[in-house]
Image: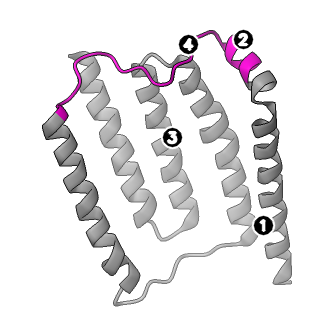
Amino acid sequence: MLETVLFLIFAAICVGGAINLVAQRHPISSALSLIVVMGSLAMVYLLLGAEFVAAVQIIIYAGAIMVLFVFVIMLLNAGEEERSATGSRVAMVLGVPGLLAAAVTTGWVLTRHGIASTPVVIGEFHGTAHAIGRLLFHEFLLPFEVTSVLILIAIMGAVVLARRGE
């Protein structure tokens, strides 16, 4: 019972942070809202018994990646977003039906299958941090390195875009 209450609290914080992320006009405020979302997701991972994933969520995503995001936002000197009075037509044409379709699908799945009373296992691999690290740096070394190169290219692209205005 306590786990369900905690899950609902952290899920509400996560959804509220996500809504605030989209609603903010200033990019730094959006980045801070994203940190709230990542922190609440880490707490949900803890409730699921995935301590390693929760630690990685905090250390890598809420820590390192968000520092990178804030660095790029400040490097680009992004100011407050200007909004039009009428809003976006694309958001109204595609967003509202997409939101309704997602809500109907979620409602249908929950009414058909119900909320699971058995514990959910995320992924098929269970093990220690040493075993996960061994798997990451041996079997999945190429995707790991490709990801790091892509992040480096994104940083270089941000620097080029920032310098172009000078």
Question: What separation in Å lies between label 1 and label 2 (alpha carbons)?
Answer: 35 Å
Give the amino acid type for the residue marked by disc 2 in the picture: His
- The residue under label 1 is 158
- Residue range in magenta is 113-135
- The residue under label 4 is 126
Q: Is residue 52 above or below residue 73?
A: above
Q: Nearer the viewer, residue 143 or 153?
A: 143
Question: What separation in Å lies between label 3 and label 2 (alpha carbons)?
Answer: 24 Å
Do callouts 1 and 4 mark residues in contact (Cβ within 8 Å)? no
Question: What separation in Å lies between label 1 and label 4 (alpha carbons)?
Answer: 38 Å
112 lies left or right of 65: left
Question: What separation in Å lies between label 4 and label 3 (alpha carbons)?
Answer: 22 Å
Query: Of helix, strand and loop, which mostly describes the magenta segment?
Result: loop
The C terminus, quarter of image: bottom right
Tell us which disc is closer to us: 3 or 2.
2
Give the amino acid type for the residue marked by disc 3 in the picture: Met
Mark 1 / mark 2, whichever is N-terminal: 2
